[in-house]
Image (spheres, coloured by chain):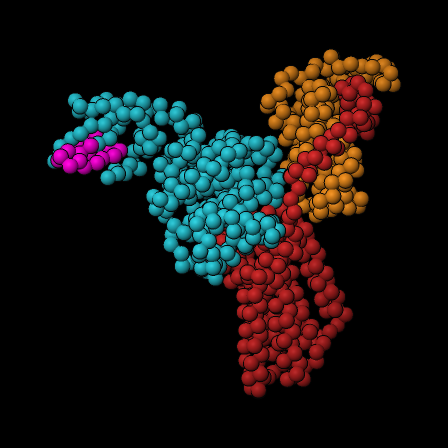
Amino acid sequence: MKLEVENITKKYKDKTAVDNVSITFTPGVWGLLGANGAGKTTLMRMIAGIMEPTEGKILYDGVPIETLQGEYRRIFGYLPQEFGFYPEFNVQDYLEYMAALKGMPKREAKRKIDELLEQVSLSEVRKKKIVKLSGGMKRRVGIAQALLNDPEVLILDEPTSGLDPGERVRFRNLLSEFAKDRIVVISTHIVSDVEYIANQNAIMKDGKIIENDTTEQLVRLVDGKIWECKIPSSDLVKWERALKLINLRNEADGTTSIRYLSDQAETPDSVSAVPRLEDLYLWLFPQEGEVRL
Amino acid sequence: MSRKMKEKLSRAFETYDVCKLNNVEHMQAVEEPVIQLAKAQFQKSYRNKNKFRDLLLCQLKFCGIKMWTFELLIAIITSLILRNLLADPYFMTTRKLVFFVVCFAIAVPMMLLPFLYRSIRYQMFEMESVSVFSIKTVLFSKFLLFFGGEVLLVASVLLVLWNTTSITFAELAGCILIPFLLANDGYLLLLKKIKSEKLCQSFLGFGIVLIAIIVISFRLTEQMLWMRMTPATVVSILGLVLYGVYQSMTLFKKYE
Amino acid sequence: MREEILIKNLQNGDASALDELISMYYQEILRYCIWHAPDRTQAEDAAQETFLKAVKYLGNFGFSGKFRAFLYKIAANTCIDMQKNKWNQHTALEDLQEEPSYVEKDFKNVEEELVICSLVKNLELKDQEIVLLRFGQNLKLREIAEIVGLPMRTVQSRLKVSLKVIEKEMKGGNLR
């Protein structure tokens, strides 16, 4: 089972959002990483079949998705970055409506909805209007909707925005379990979401895929470039300006532990650290850097 | 290319197949296992799927009731307004009345717009696009439901007018039906041809253009051609109805 | 008409419709695959794969004639897929067996016809497809347009050009 994206391009009058992207997705969790505006959402919409590419084609199981049409959408689950719902919908209504649109017979839909509400812990609020739910709960409704028809291909665009850390962990576990024998593509700029569950990652920049490999292979790119050391907290400002900091943590003894990116050790006591996907991301997209406390 | 050469070409393909096959009779024997395998695959992958009527019912439950309530409200309001206006001698001229009726007949289908626009405004459009039914079919189901309400709306207004004025039913039917059917058929055509993202704008544009045409034609003509139930009007009404049915059939069958 | 009924039954869950439906199309799809595959066995594989996929992804077909186009599209892509993976060599035309008992013509004609085939194989892939579908599979232009994903007018003009090219080669050689 595979999803082949062949030479997909999307051109607008003034810019090229996706530039000759070719990638083959196989079962497992895939991370699609990149900054905002890199073309991830456009690519995902073309994969979902709701946007026509300017050039190129997308094949599922060796058949172009335009040929499969409705049948492709039957095995497809999609959660866009911004999804909405009619204001009068409560959780149950919304899922029933989406189930009907996905061609699921009523009985099957009811059973599946009950099951999913349990899994995303929304059973108690099923009769509550979605507008009244918290951001995290809304997102969980969206995830439930994407899983309704037990899709073979699941595409999630920034699925964890608005979720608290606990919910993020639950989400990761849910997806890991689900992704066995299925293709799951998660587009995100929160690398930690996919770091531990994605087998392969594709990195997008300016509409192109610049890297595409397993997590292990990708992090090797920054091998020997990640350092950890302790600095006096009073020097923090100086070091912040001088180095590309990835992480910092204030210690009790007046020092700060820092993790930084550099081709060589910048302090005598710097120790080489094992690189993570997040480090790679910050190396590729320095302007996206966000120092974590 | 001459016919002789074309025949040669066709035969060439046949020869190629024969040469590759070596044994033409064997072809039938290979068919049977494929059929059995296909049946097995079918049993494995067949799922009960919703049909169009299930989509319609679902739309009815979640959107249709709202639509019909809205249309009922409009029907009541329009009837009340009409009754009041008809009492006014200024308004009572037949020409003004006919103009009102024709514009009303065109405006009614335009009321579908807010319901279509809802889908975009509440960002449901993307989700509805990833349905097993094509987005066009989903939109068509909304259109169909709305049309049901439209018919009742227009009929109620027609009845009010028939009761309170001296215009005959036939004349009223003539001047309501043609613009009404024209507007709806136009919408169906747009639904079929225009890309779904541009649908709202095109519907709006079409409605405005149609009203502009009506206004201009009223300015230009003295005759109230609308009113006469001539054979031409009957034929055009029938034609428009059939066209509408035909378009609906193709939209309904165009699942994909 | 018959096909519509069969497909309707199939969509309602009746597997027995496949008996007739596949019988209707097997030979023609096999012939299509024979053109693309290097040998008979792989052509049969491709044809089988085509029908299995068609059954798996059977959609809703409103009008008749769409099913055929659907089958061909799947067949085309199956052959392309197999081309990418399994098929390594094309059988040279000279290696094709010519069984006298099945070929009821004289040797010279067969040789000539195989040369015509090689002329077709020299065309650009899309043009090859169009000629194959028109003269090998006897499909209508409208169906061909749908299968290759080009407007009918384009298909018509490309076909004309291809035929001119073939004719030129045929006349230029020792063929008459």
The percent position of residue C121, horizontal first and vertical second, equals 69, 21
Residue closer to the observer: C4 or B78: C4
Is A250 inside the magenta-drawn segment? yes
**Residue positioned 75% across, 38% down in the render:** C18
The colour one sees for chain B in the rendered image is: red
Answer above or below: position of C63 versus A62.
below
Q: Would residue A89 be visible to someone looking at this image?
A: yes
A125 vs A58, left or right, is: left
Answer above or below: position of B57 versus A47.
below
**Residue positioned 64% across, 16% down in the render:** C89
Is B143 inside the magenta-drawn segment? no
The colour one sees for chain C in the rendered image is: orange
Answer above or below: position of B225 versus A152.
below
Rendered-image quadrant of the C terminus of chain A: top left
The percent position of residue C50, horizontal first and vertical second, equals 68, 31
Rendered-image quadrant of the N terminus of chain A: top right
C90 vs A254, left or right, is: right
Q: Would residue C70 be visible to someone looking at this image?
A: no
**Residue positioned 67% across, 69% down in the render:** B177
The percent position of residue C64, horizontal first and vertical second, equals 74, 44
Q: Quadrant of residue A216?
A: top left
Q: Which residues are magenta?
A: A237-257
The colour one sees for chain A in the rendered image is: cyan
**Residue positioned 54% across, 41% down in the render:** A151
Residue closer to the observer: A121 or C128: A121
